[in-house]
Amino acid sequence: MIAALREPERHGDTDQGSQYASADYKAVLKRYRCIQSMSRRGNCWDNAVAESFFATLKKGVVHGEYFATHRHARQVIFEYIEVYYNRIRRHSTNGWLSPAAFERLHYQSLEDSTAY
């Protein structure tokens, strides 16, 4: 959700399936100003962070749950991602910081390095 607030570009990671290499798919990416990131053939680590995220989301929120409406599912998933996953849950790939804390430090370091 936060990616939708950022400009000027968005990133989407995909595997090498033909549906992701099609002209139609690339046209949709272009329309929404997205940059496609496609895994290299035979390199399963390219997608490791995304795969881990979706596994965690499924285990923590989706499996065993019944959502009466699509809206309810979106609300629960949004709250999990924006409240818990991005702000509270610490991640090993971020030096055991939450994504929000890691991003703050990253942008602060950029500001500090350009201040002089």
Image: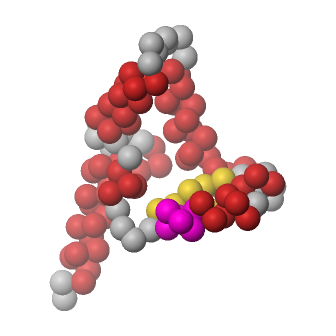
Residue 24 position, x and y percent, is 70, 60
The residue nearer to you, when weighing 46 against 78, is 78
| Residue 61 visible at all | no
Range drawn in magenta: 29-34
At 36% across and 67% down in the image, what residue appears?
A: 7
Residue 36 position, x and y percent, is 61, 63
At 66% across and 53% down in the image, what residue appears?
A: 14
The residue nearer to you, when weighing 89 against 86, is 86
Which image quarter holds the C terminus?
Answer: bottom left
- Residue extending farthest left: 115
Q: Is residue 115 left or right of residue 77?
A: left
The residue nearer to you, when weighing 11 against 22, is 22
Residue 33 position, x and y percent, is 49, 67
Please, is residue 43 above or below residue 35 in the view?
above
User: Residue 5 lies in what quarter of the image?
Assistant: bottom left
| Residue 13 visible at all | yes
At 53% across and 65% down in the image, what residue appears?
A: 31
Q: Is residue 99 magenta?
A: no
Q: Is residue 36 left or right of residue 16?
A: left
Q: Is residue 59 left or right of residue 40?
A: left
Residue 91 position, x and y percent, is 42, 42
User: Residue 81 lies in what quarter of the image?
Assistant: top left
Please, is residue 37 above or below residue 96 in the view?
below
